[in-house]
Image (cartoon, rainbow, N blue to C red):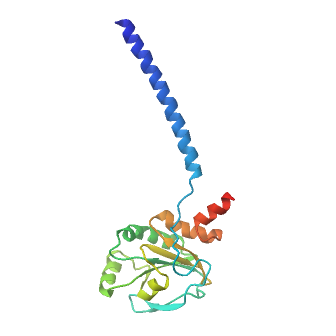
Amino acid sequence: MLNALLVSQVVLLLLVVALGVVVFALTRQIGVLHERIAPAGALMVAGGPKVGEAAPGMEVTDIEGRTIPIGGQADDGRSRLIFFLSPTCPVCKTLLPVLKSAQKSERDWLEIQLASDGDLAEHRRFFSDAGLDSFTYLLSSALGRGYQVGKLPFAVLIDELGIIRSKGLVNSREHLESLFEAKNRGVASIQEYFSKADH
C-alpha cells in the first residue's frame, strides 16, 4: 500500500513538472506572437476621396444652423477629424467618451467635428442627451455622399492644408489613434507603415 502511494506521488510530481514546462513554453510562444502581430488600425475603404488628395470643398450646415466650410486650408492652423456617426449606432455611442477625451488632449492641433444626416429634432436630442456641446455637429447628407461613407462609425482626418491624411472605419480607441499615428508617420494607414517597415 505504501509503495502504491509513493509511486502515485512520484507520477503526480512528474506531471506537475511537465505541466510547468508546457506552461512556460506557451508563455514564451505568446510573447513571440505578440511581437509579430502589428496593431490593427482603422479599416481603409476603397471608395471616396483618396488619402493624399485635397478634401472635397463644400459648405454644410450644423445643427445650430451655422454654415461650416469643409476642405481647404484651416484658418486656425489645426487639422480636422470628421467623425461620421448616428444616434442609433451603438458602436458610435461607445466611442463618444474617446472622442471627448481626444477633443481635450489633442486640441492644440486637432478639431473633431461630428457628422450625420437625418431628422434635425432627433439629432438635437442626441446632441443634448450625450453632452456633445464641445463639438461642431454637422448635419448633411451631401457630406456623407461626398466621402462615400457606407458604414459607421467612419472618420476622415484632414490636415491644416485641407489634404486627407487618413480615413477608415473606426470601432475602437486604437482605430481612432491609428488615424493620428498614420498622419504623424506620413502614411495612409498603420498597415501601410508596417508593410513598409517589413521590407
Residue located at (60% from left, 69% from top)? 182
Q: Is residue 23 above or below residue 5?
A: below
| Quadrant of the drawing holding the C terminus | bottom right
The image quadrant that residue 151 belongs to is bottom left
Residue located at (65% from left, 71% from top)? 186
Q: Position of residue 188 (x, y in %)?
A: 60, 71
> Looking at this view, is 154 or 62 the one in front?
154
Which residue is outermost to the right? 199
| Quadrant of the drawing holding the N terminus | top left
Q: Position of residue 162 (x, y in %)?
A: 59, 84
Q: How many marks?
A: 0
> Looking at this view, is 102 or 114 the one in front?
114
Residue located at (35% from left, 72% from top)? 89
Q: Position of residue 24 (x, y in %)?
A: 53, 34
> Looking at this view, is 142 or 77 the one in front?
142
The image quadrant that residue 181 belongs to is bottom right
User: Does the image show residue 140?
Assistant: no
Which residue is outermost to the front? 46
Q: Position of residue 31 (x, y in %)?
A: 56, 44
User: Does the image show residue 180?
Assistant: yes
Q: Is residue 103 above or below residue 3?
A: below
